[in-house]
Image (spheres, rainbow, N blue to C red):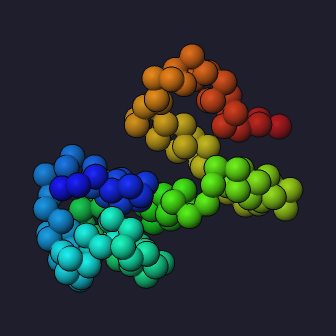
Amino acid sequence: MKPSEKKLGLAIQLFLMRNGLQIEALAQQMGITGDALSNLIHGRRGFKNETLEKLANTPAFQSDGISLHQLRAFRAVDEYSFEELILALVEYIRQGEIERLPKDFFQNLQASMERDGIPPSLASKRHALFSLIQEDPS
């Protein structure tokens, strides 16, 4: 399989490889054809919210703990520049959205980063990264 140039597509391909699944099997769980899923993975078609929901609700993705929020985040990375995402994050913080996050959000984020690892190029900044996501005890 040719690697996708899209972050979301590549994440799906890696998921398939890690779990020993064929694209047709995942597509069947979603209720679409293998060709349709291939078109989505390679960016020839765009993932709509409904399609991402189908993907997140497949037994394969649910058993691996991959959420709709994570899939939508990968899609956002494909659609927006890093600068745009940071500016959006700052705007959300300004609007007080950080207070609406689930209580265990930062714990789950840190656990995810520890489980999935940090790129070697950021290993020296691991402590700083984790300190950024620590909850304020006050």
Q: Would you place residue 51 above or below residue 95 in this image?
A: below
> In the picture, residue 79 is in which quadrant?
bottom right
* Quarter of the C terminus within the rendering: top right
Using residue 121 as the reference point, say whether residue 2 is left or right of it: left
> In the picture, residue 63 is in which quadrant?
bottom left
> In the picture, residue 94 is in which quadrant?
bottom right
Q: Is residue 31 visible?
A: yes
- Judging depth in this view, the residue of 81 and 72 nearest the camera is 81
* Quarter of the N terminus within the rendering: bottom left
The location of residue 128, given as percent across then percent down, is 66, 24
Using residue 124 as the reference point, say whether residue 6 is left or right of it: left
Looking at the image, which residue is at 36% across and 73% down?
44
Q: Would you place residue 34 above or below residue 70 in this image?
A: below
The location of residue 72, given as percent across then percent down, is 50, 65
Using residue 11 as the reference point, say whether residue 74 is left or right of it: right
Looking at the image, which residue is at 49% across and 36% down?
113
Using residue 69 as the reference point, say whether residue 125 is left or right of it: right
Looking at the image, which residue is at 77% across and 37% down?
136
The location of residue 90, given as percent across then percent down, is 79, 52
